[in-house]
Image: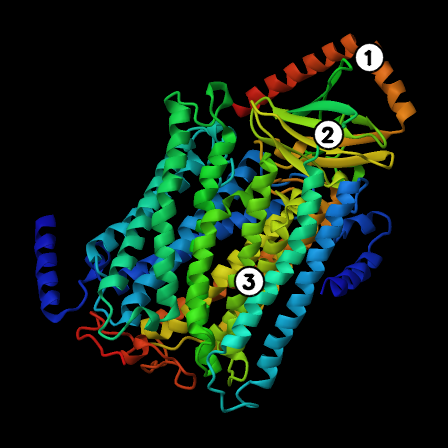
Amino acid sequence: MSTVQTHAGHADTHHDHDHHGPAKGLRRWLFATNHKDIGTMYLVFSLTMFFVGGTMAMIIRAELFQPGLQLVDPMFFNSMTTMHALVMIFGAVMPAFVGLANWMIPLQIGAPDMALPRMNNLSFWILPFAFLLLLSTLFVEGGAPASGWTMYPPLSLQTGNAFPMSIFAIHLMGASSIMGAINVIVTIMNMRAPGMTLLKMPLFTWSWLITAYLIIAVMPVLAGAVTMLLTDHFFGTTFFSAAGGGDPVMYQHIFWFFGHPEVYIMILPAFGIVSEIIPTFSRKRLFGYDAMVYAIASIAFLSFIVWAHHMFTVGMPLAGQMFFMLATMLIAVPTGVKVFNWTATMYKGSLTFEPPMLFAISFLFMFSIGGFSGLMLAIVPADFQYHDSYFVVAHFHYVLVPGAVFAIMAAAYFWLPKWTGHMYNQKLAKAHFWLSTIFVNVLFFPQHFLGLAGMPRRIPDYNTQFADWNMVSSIGAFGFGLSQLIFLYIVWQCARGGVKATDKVWDGGMPHGLEWTLSSPPPYHSFEVAPEVK
Amino acid sequence: MLKILKYVAAAIAACVPAGAAFAAWELNMPVGVTELSREIHGLHMMVLWVCVLIAVVVFAVIIYSIIAFRRSKHPVPATFDHSTKVEVIWTVIPIAILVGMAIPAAETLIKIEDMRDSELTVKVTGYQWQWHYDYLDEGVSFFSRLDRDSDAARQLNSGIDPNTIDNYLLEVDNRFVVPVDTKVRVLLTSSDVAHAWWVPEFGMKKDAYPGFVNEIWFRADKPGVYRGQCAELCGYDHAFMPVVVEVKSKEEFSAWLQAQQANGTEAAQVADSQADNAAEAAVARAE
């Protein structure tokens, strides 16, 4: 029976290869080498993980809805904060950007596919296994990892059976990310259409080129850090234990040397997306293209010399604190340049407010708010108050949710018609936008107040003085979470059918770039003949 | 922005029963009761207002562009796409603003790191999940744990309303007592995992690590009781190891210290057995 099916499968594949179309059924996805199919799988995977991680966030906010412990015990609560972060960072945000890179980079540089299609397949298919492993720790003895996504020793060494599983899962995710990054770099360096010089590349491709270098630079550092945890736990080493001459703070230095560039891995592609969308719907060229590229490069460089601002309270020498404060403050300069340039792009343009533009403008406002709180956090004396409080939680959620996640949604609304060939329900998308924007602020803005008033992060229960803002925040969380179901429905509906999208999709706007010269959806091998770039 | 929110919050707070309501809708960092906490609060407000000002200007331009340059009002877009002059301006001005912020921040930081001339030194050790205070050279030491009322109420589905507990989760059995107007140096360490000692009214927070000693100092200038919490995730009961500092007048403090020294051995024994019980409970729970 199985032999027969295999033969049939072979016949199918052969047939399809003649016509340069996708394989049929499961084989199309399992053995995918096409950049668009792999991109789609990344995006679907990311959306799935977004809802898995979102469910964990709902559990966290439900427990914090009022003081006292009503739903979960503290250990499970700690598992939820830990797993929420790991799933959202490595499962939702990063794969979403890799999916967008897979879809858009070949289209934007005029290539037929990614340079390394088989590695592309491997880098995707590692992920479902990595996350099965990670999520299965919820059911093992001792519970899921509960020491925070940063896994600081000595606490993380108290993790039960989940410990080696989560570390192996992180190794897998790292390997997947590195392969994805190598593919991006090789593709951009070798497969650009004739005439597509580096400084003619669209900003999204540029932001990904720089991001890919960051990934290659720091993912091995994370792998090293967690491997040392592993040997400390099982093989008697004492890298992070003073009892054997080690130092728990050294782990934090190594971790954040990965961690800070990681933060920018999750925001630089968002900068690229916004830089594509704002000019399109402002009907005006991006203001200061060169400055935008240099700003991304400077941010990437600075990201390597600011890591210790995550750990001002560990007891660093005065000179160290000074250096990391000043270096961190410097990041405000290129980031400011980006915000000013986006604003200048809109200035004297001719603006319309389609869903991608709405999300991009929302990004502009709320990413700036996250940037401002970031500047406040850089001021070391004030950080002694902010550190590990809800103020920090508010800060990084502002840059990650209405920052990175809104940019990903803007990208989906921008390119979805190009991918599927159908226009989605714009009215519903606008409803999704308004609900998301309102609720995300109800959710995260009060967390600034909670942190300033003295509420530490990562606690399942709190003094009654924090009750009111926590309730407001939880209501915002439930509203935001439910609103995302609209997004799911819009994507599903658009994938199934709808009004045919034109090649340019946004005919009223000013879409520029090679992706808009192809049909919607684009042909199976994208650019079979390299286009000419003037 | 913050002011409007403050009014809105005040309006909402007015509808809620008075007293508790004021603290509940708190929006800002406490000014605190030490020189350092006041300076930190000042820095915080300065940076906040600079950010608010920049935000007002930038957001105003964005909103103006959204309104004035929407297609129905402004159908023909301009064609400029760069201007070296303005780009240099909006690179240089932020640098100047940053320098203006960094100087006072550095000055305060230097004060914070100046540990000289302390008048009382206390070693504070973090345990899963309680604090131990050791008045070096005074022969007084004790453990400080979450008080019984909070501990009963915080159990899963305890049926006890946290609102009926005074200082829910922010009260301990033995408070850390210090004299007013005295430079107290706190040496921080831990017996197991990382903890962080934080009292918002003192403006200060620092981590405690096993095998290492960190130090901070404070000089409280107002007697009273000041409450904080462990601020570094330390496991199961991380949320339940409060820091409570009672600042007494110098005379009251000496009297307190003498009383402690008098029944020192006894208190120490009680505290030790308490610690053992706690450690056993922790082990049982972890298993």
Same subunit: marks 3 and 2: no
Nearest the viewer among A95 and A69 is A95
CA–CA distance between discs 3 and 2? 42 Å
Q: Residue at x 31, y 45 (%)?
A: A175
The kind of secondary structure element at disc 1 is helix
CA–CA distance between discs 1 and 2? 27 Å
- Residue farthest toward the top in the current orientation of the protein: B265
Task: Assign the C terminus of chain A to one quadrant of the image.
Answer: bottom left
Residue type of the residue flagged with mark 1:
Gln
Report the residue marked by disc 2.
B116
Residue type of the residue flagged with mark 2:
Arg
Report the residue marked by disc 1.
B261
User: Tag 1: Cα neighbours inside 10 Å, few (<14), some, or many (≥20)?
Assistant: some
Left or right of B275 in this view: A480: left
Q: Are marks 1 and 2 in contact (CB under 8 Å)?
A: no
Q: Residue at x 30, y 54 (%)?
A: A180
Report the residue marked by disc 3.
A367
Give the percent coordinates (x, y) of residue A329: 57, 54
Give the percent coordinates (x, y) of residue A531: 22, 77
Q: Chain of mark 2?
A: B
The kind of secondary structure element at disc 3 is helix
